[in-house]
Amino acid sequence: MAVWWVLAALLCLEVGWGYQINVSPAVVESSARVFLEEAEERLMNQCTTTMKAAWDYQTNLTTPGRSRLINEQDAFKRVQEESREQATRWRAVDYLFSDPDLKARLEAMSVAGLSELPAPSMTSYQRVLSDMTHIYSSASICSLHHPSRCGLTPHAAAGINEVLSSSRNTEELAHLWRAWRDKTKLARRSYNSFVDLANQAARTSNFKHKGNLNLVEYGGESFRVQLEEAWEQLEPLYRQLHAYVRRKLREVYGPRVVRERGPLPAHLLGNLWGQSWPLPYLLPRLDIPPLDVTPEMKRQGYTPRTMFQIADNFFASLGLERAPASFWRNSLLQEPDDGRAMVCSPSTWDFCDTEDFRVKQCTEISQDDFISAHHEMAHLQYSRSYRHQPYLYRNGANPGFQEAVGLAVGLSVATPRHLRRMGLLRAGQEPSYPAQINTLMHLALRQLPFMPYARVLDIWRDGVFNGTFSRKDWNCAWWDLRVSVQGIKPPETRTEEDFDPAAKYQVAADLSYTKYFVAFVLQFQIYKALCMAAGEYDPYKPSRSLHKCDFYLSTDAGNALKSMMKLGSSRPWEEALEVLTEGRETRLNATAMREYYKPLEEWLKRDNLRNDEFVGWRPDGEHCLYKKPRGRSCDFT
Ligand SMILES: *[C@@H]1O[C@H](CO)[C@@H](O)[C@H](O)[C@H]1NC(C)=O
Ligand SMILES: *[C@@H]1O[C@H](CO)[C@@H](O)[C@H](O)[C@H]1NC(C)=O
Ligand SMILES: *[C@@H]1O[C@H](CO)[C@@H](O)[C@H](O)[C@H]1NC(C)=O
Ligand SMILES: [Zn+2]
């Protein structure tokens, strides 16, 4: 390494002070390439070791396993920091390089994550982050009516969200909503320091503020416009759903609790953050049970393994590669019964060595897990298809792509058409129109409220990082956005003593939410592109509506998908999308999402009209009290 450094330093001298030194740019460039390749090799090897330790721990939760994982993670972090630091120095002379790919890979290596802060700041930064996640992770609350029921959190099974979606007792609902925020608001003081330190780190890497750094993986600041446009496209549909849900809530709680033209009370929505509204009584037809092939799967003797074999067949039918023998040998497809504890949430693993890929899923014989098996196998397909790329490009085209592909495959597999092709649904069991609307509503209640929620999180964090929102007004700025973008209001007036954004883990841990918004929009763009390639979508034929499409057996769809996936992140994501859509699309675009939900949107419009429901909302009171200038002393400024 040292040798390359001398060369680069010499060149800087030449540039800086006009010394004549005979080092040709070609020599520097080839040195940079050697550095890059060695650094990638080191990253790759440490990545493999770390993934192995993580797999061993997650599939067998033991204390020694945990220490081994922590050690490997630390080692990985060190290798990453080292590579980043050196790559940054090479970039200082990259104007000498003729190979654009070399420049791009050095850039990718140098911008991964937050740059180092000077010593005391870096320590504070890490402490502040860990304080915030600790406050969140150790928070728990008690039930109002059953005070002995304590330890409630939003993440455990039978936790806060389960009560929120089943209880109709407004006192209990408001209590849970408030109590969680009383615990998590303690993060405000730390968040204050966090914003300063994060901005300082972002500025060290030449970003105006942390909000801009967060957009690097999407191509930079201009991506904000695309996010906003996609949301504007969805807004009319969201407002129809909002009006319909308000009427349903009013039927349950009465017009004094749910005002005719007001925002929705956040505690009544079945979810602690109002980001999905999974209330069973919101379905239009309660007498029609949802489509569920679980009994038929059991009758036919499905096992976890057959479910994954069928998923593998799905991709083979598109002309994609089958999972390798090592996948079947190493994966964990059902919960072991030897008494060990493990992390059961489904995930797909890339061990960074181009050969070892696995899935971990505690598969139950159910329709949900059948779809999940396909979702995980989609991740596997994606990761394997870019395995020949250089290490730094072995990612989805942007952070939303991997998830979007998994979701798009899930849409196809969940169609009655596909379940019939699998012999899980008999011919003639075609769902009626009301049943289709029910199914679309079920999905819409989980997806659409998420979109404005994700926007609020992004816009709020941007405003905090760029300094538009004054520190003493952070909570009221949050509620202004919640009311105006989501049409949701708090159960009671909030103040600047509260800090409601911190009720969400991704705020406390400073994790990106943009990627979920992007994944939700993209899944429909990808789904539509594959359906068009398969000849399964025709906007002018109801029998070929987007929500009915199954692209199974289509090698044309498979080729389109393959051409996109194999790029990994080697090209800007717009190009990956362009390849997939045969040049039709190069932007985030919610048109496909609107098309998918079109039958539901038409139904909602008719239903709202028939009930003479006001579409939209007006603030109906003061939802948050701004701190008066020169009022009581403020803790946070
Ligand atoms: C789980 O880890 C423990 C401790 O390292 C080990 O003794 C045990 O054999 C492991 N179990 C399995 C199934 O690998
Ligand atoms: C700062 O962020 C807010 C909220 O996202 C936005 O409205 C505003 O335009 C941004 N200002 C600047 C100078 O970027
Ligand atoms: C979105 O896609 C549709 C067709 O798929 C196109 O007509 C429209 O112009 C696109 N919008 C943007 C903003 O790219
Ligand atoms: Zn996934």
Image: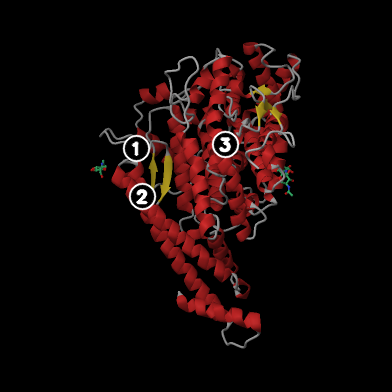
Does dot 3 land on a helix, a strand or a loop?
Answer: helix
Q: Is residue 209 left or right of residue 149?
A: right
Tell me which amino acid carries mark 1: Met
Residue in the picture at 72% in, 42% down:
229
Tell me which amino acid carries mark 2: Leu
Q: Whole-Å distance between the Cαs marked 3 and 2?
A: 28 Å
Indicate the position of residue 405 as horizontal and vertical percent values: 54, 43
Viewer-nearest of labels 1 and 2? 2
Tell me which image quadrant ligand 1 sits in.
top left
Does dot 2 land on a helix, a strand or a loop?
Answer: helix
The residue to which callout 2 is attached is 69
Q: For residue 182, say whether it is visible.
A: yes
Indicate the position of residue 48 as horizontal and vertical percent values: 38, 55
N-terminal label among 1 and 2: 2
Give whichever of 290, 624 is nearer the camera: 624
Indicate the position of residue 526 as horizontal and vertical percent values: 59, 42
Residue in the picture at 56% in, 59% down:
111
The residue to which callout 1 is attached is 342
Q: Whole-Å distance between the Cαs marked 3 and 1?
A: 29 Å
Assign the C terminus to one quadrant of the image: top right
The residue to which callout 3 is attached is 502
Assign the N terminus to one quadrant of the image: bottom left
